[in-house]
Image (spheres, rainbow, N blue to C red):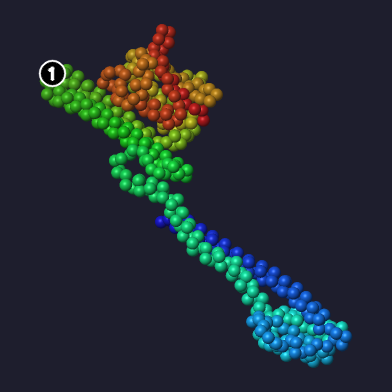
């Protein structure tokens, strides 16, 4: 499991230490180069100065001058001076200098290695053809560069542990609201879906997280409330329906008159049909409720679905000598709704129109296409739904017509599908010169 605190601490420590190493190496090599250049220049200047000071008209110098005559410096052994005759005889040398030439008898700067020691040498020929060699040990330069680099890097090396401790404390302090939010969620009882109220709401990065958690808990609370209400309502409706079925079955079993038995069996059959329809609608609700907006967004051609729904409901219309018509003049239109959901929506509307229209009447379905939407109109000869009931009939288990046929779920299913698909539903009751109709508006695909 990844720890944000550990990740931040390791990442910052890696960056600080890596940066320090890079700075140290860059400082060392850069300092070495600059010191090398500086000391080479000083070496040339010292050689020319010695050549100038050591010259007289005979170009002679007292050899004892180059030997210690008093307190000196520890680094003095890293500086060497030699004077050679033109025929290769050592005329003068500083103390602790090898007796062999420090470099070839060629004027200019050079680097040589004598007895495992590196020397930076400047060779100059004097006017009397003698050779002057002024040298500096490479170890002196390396010690100086290391000392300079250490002086630059030492504060970083001392500061790194302190810096990491301060960073760890800052990370711990910065993540404290997250820890508080985590503890608040972890300690929350699973029955408690009330919004969180922690210090995270004062942190710009965590406030959206707390708001998202609160929004999720509100949605869960609403979903649980809907499911509890749905379960209670469904249990009540099914219990009432089963009680009626049991009553009709008992009547059919105990009645002696054949005609009364036949009527009781007809009522029992109607009750079974209603129970079948209610179970089918409950299953449709169970499939639709968990659906999301994106899950329903599929392109579907309207007319094939309408024709299939009308063909399936023809037996129901035939029992009541009703006719079902489709406006064939409608243009082909595609809507942004899955065919299964469109089928459920149309089936409920057309079935309601058939059930609540008088026998021998006509139900007409019209599909009309607009610039951004498609209207599906179901027109019948029933009373329709008034404006006062248009909202309530979309609630679950509400029946506008108080009879034993409806379960009060059809329009609730239609309303739920339209809510997810971004559509709308409008009712027009029967009026003078106008049949009752319902209009479904769906977005054009």
Write the residue at 66% across / 84% down. 71
The quadrant in which residue 258 appears is top left
Above or below for 167 versus 366: below
The quadrant in which residue 59 appears is bottom right
Figure label count = 1
The percent position of residue 48, horizontal first and vertical second, equals: 80, 78
Above or below for 118 versus 183: below
The percent position of residue 15, horizontal first and vertical second, equals: 54, 60
Q: As drawn, is 373 to the left or to the right of 226?
A: right
Q: As drawn, is 12 to the left or to the right of 240?
A: right
Q: Is residue 406 visible?
A: yes
Residue nearest the observer in this picture, 386 or 279: 386
Mark 1: secondary structure: loop
The residue to which callout 1 is attached is: 257
Q: From the image, which quarter does the N terminus lie in?
A: bottom left
Q: Is residue 322 visible?
A: no
């Amino acid at each position: 499991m990844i720890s944000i605190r550990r990740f931040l601490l390791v990442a910052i420590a890696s960056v600080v230490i890596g940066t320090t190493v890079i700075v140290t190496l860059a400082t060392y090599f850069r300092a070495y180069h600059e010191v090398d250049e500086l000391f080479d220049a000083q070496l040339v200047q010292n050689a020319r100065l010695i050549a100038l000071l050591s010259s007289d008209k005979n170009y002679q110098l007292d050899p004892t001058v180059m030997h210690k005559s008093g307190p000196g410096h520890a680094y003095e052994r890293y500086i060497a001076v030699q004077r050679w005759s033109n025929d290769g005889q050592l005329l003068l040398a500083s103390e602790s200098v090898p007796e062999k030439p420090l470099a070839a008898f060629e004027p200019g700067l050079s680097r040589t290695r004598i007895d495992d020691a590196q020397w930076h040498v400047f060779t100059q020929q004097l006017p009397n053809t003698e050779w002057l060699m002024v040298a500096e040990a490479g170890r002196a330069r390396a010690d100086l560069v290391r000392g300079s680099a250490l002086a630059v890097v030492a504060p970083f090396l001392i500061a790194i542990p302190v810096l990491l401790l301060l960073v760890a404390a800052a990370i711990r302090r910065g993540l404290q609201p997250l820890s508080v939010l985590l503890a608040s969620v972890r300690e929350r009882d699973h029955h408690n879906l009330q919004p969180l109220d922690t210090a995270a709401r004062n942190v710009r990065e965590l406030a959206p997280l707390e708001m998202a958690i609160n929004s999720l808990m509100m949605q869960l609370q609403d979903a649980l409330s809907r499911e509890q209400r749905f379960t209670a309502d469904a249990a009540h409706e099914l219990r009432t329906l089963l009680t009626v079925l049991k009553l009709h079955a008992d009547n059919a079993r105990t009645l002696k008159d054949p005609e009364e038995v036949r009527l009781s069996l007809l009522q029992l059959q109607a009750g079974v049909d209603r129970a079948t329809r209610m179970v089918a609608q409950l299953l449709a609700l169970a499939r639709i409720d968990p659906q999301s907006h994106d899950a329903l967004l599929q392109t579907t051609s309207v007319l094939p679905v309408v024709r299939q729904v009308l063909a399936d409901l023809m037996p129901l219309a035939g029992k009541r000598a009703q006719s079902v018509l489709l406006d064939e003049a409608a243009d082909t239109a595609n809507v942004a709704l899955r065919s299964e959901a469109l089928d459920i929506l149309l089936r409920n509307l057309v079935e309601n129109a058939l059930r609540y229209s008088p026998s021998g009447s006509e139900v007409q379905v019209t599909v009309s296409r607009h610039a951004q939407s498609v209207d599906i109109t179901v027109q019948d000869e029933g009373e329709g739904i008034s404006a006062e009931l248009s909202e309530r009939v979309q609630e679950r288990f509400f029946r506008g017509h108080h009879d034993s046929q409806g379960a009060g779920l059809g329009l609730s299913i239609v309303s739920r599908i339209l809510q997810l698909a971004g559509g709308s539903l409008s009712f027009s009751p029967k009026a003078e010169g106008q049949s009752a109709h319902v209009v479904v508006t769906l977005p054009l695909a």
